[in-house]
Image (cartoon, rainbow, N blue to C red):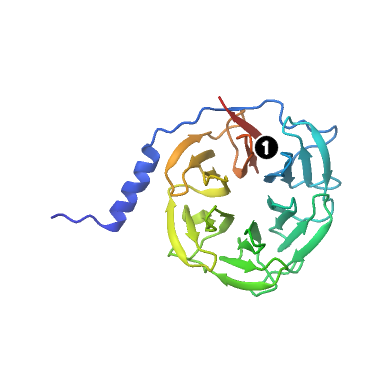
Amino acid sequence: MKWISRTSIGVLCIFAFFAIDARGDYRVTPDFPQLPGGVRLMGVSGVAIDSKGDVFIFHRGVGNADPILVFEPSGKFVRSFGKGLFKSAHGLRIDAHNNLWTTDNADHIVIKMNHDGKVLMTLGERGVSGEDDKHFNKPTDVAIADNGDFFVSDGYGNSRVVKFDKDGKYLMAWGKKGKGEGEFNLPHAVRIDSKGQLYVADRENDRVQVFDQQGKFQRQFGGFAPFGLFLTKTDELFVADGRANRALRMTAEGKVLETWGKRGPEAGSFFLPHGIAVGADGAIYVTEIDGKRVQKFVKD
């Protein structure tokens, strides 16, 4: 019997991934968003949707720009806030109580706000990096469990996931720089599925790693660069692949169902897609750092 090496198997798996013909039938909604006069988006990093369906956009506005802008699903502008709170916008999530969770990858902090933008909790020390129970090093994202525990992917400087209880008390951390199971090279996003498992976007290792909530490795899959992750209530996984300038819809086990997008400035293409979110109506929102925009996609 002729044996095939693990390396060969991995190459074959990745090659098979790219051979899949799974082009999606998504079209861009042309009138989203409708920016108010005088507002210009900078690098758009995060996007999240509240229980009403309103869309919150997190961008790297400078000067007097508000970094968080809110729009109705139609694209109509609602309000904006957050001026002076952030040095570099990164991750944005909204929990079951409509609280906002943000990460600032330049100031090394995580901020929890209520729906109106009032700061409820700040974790980390502004402007000070570290790798202990009170500091981050360029954190990227937050995922909130059903019991209120939350997990921070940390991040550009560190290579770990940090777990806290609902009150912000440090519980544990796992991960180090590397390519092995439970090791990371830029944990860039984190999500939780319906079973309570954590999906960590191990960006520079071109894979997603899955863990239980105690940090025990479950499985991994890859062949793409996961900049942004979103899991629906039915455990469909959506990925913003920043390196290939495309979006993917896949199963929670990593089977690719659809892909769309290419590099370019035209509608439906991307310049460094970064954040991704899916509304209850199935609309998909993708943010772009270099493209300085957010696009809304609906199924044909």
The furthest residue to the bottom: 132
Towards the viewer: 58 or 100:
100
Q: Left of 176 or right of it: where is 113?
A: right
Q: Estimate the x, y position of residue 50 in percent, counting from the top left.
A: 72, 44
Give the quadrant of residue 17.
top left
The furthest residue to the left: 1
Number of residue marks: 1
The C terminus lies in quadrant: top right
Q: In percent of the image, x 72 and y 55: which residue is there?
A: 102
Please tell me whether residue 88 is drawn above or below residue 163 in the rendered image: above
Local packing at callout 1 (Cα closer than 10 Å; few below 14, some 14-19, many 20+) is many
Towards the viewer: 246 or 291:
246
Task: Name the residue type under label 1.
Answer: Val
Q: Left of 189 or right of it: where is 60?
A: right
Helix, strand or loop at label 1? It is: strand
Q: Estimate the x, y position of residue 179 in percent, counting from the top left.
A: 44, 63
Q: Which residue is mark 1?
A: 294
Give the quadrant of residue 125.
bottom right
Q: Estimate the x, y position of residue 204 in percent, counting from the top left.
A: 51, 55
The N terminus lies in quadrant: bottom left
Q: Estimate the x, y position of residue 239 in percent, counting from the top left.
A: 54, 44
Towards the viewer: 282 or 112:
282
Q: In percent of the image, x 84 and y 54: which residue is there?
A: 84
Q: In percent of the image, x 44 and y 41: which residue is there?
A: 256
Q: In percent of the image, x 71 and y 26: which residue is there?
A: 31
Towards the viewer: 291 or 211:
211
Please tell me whether residue 204 is drawn above or below residue 266 in the rendered image: below
Q: Left of 17 or right of it: where is 231?
A: right
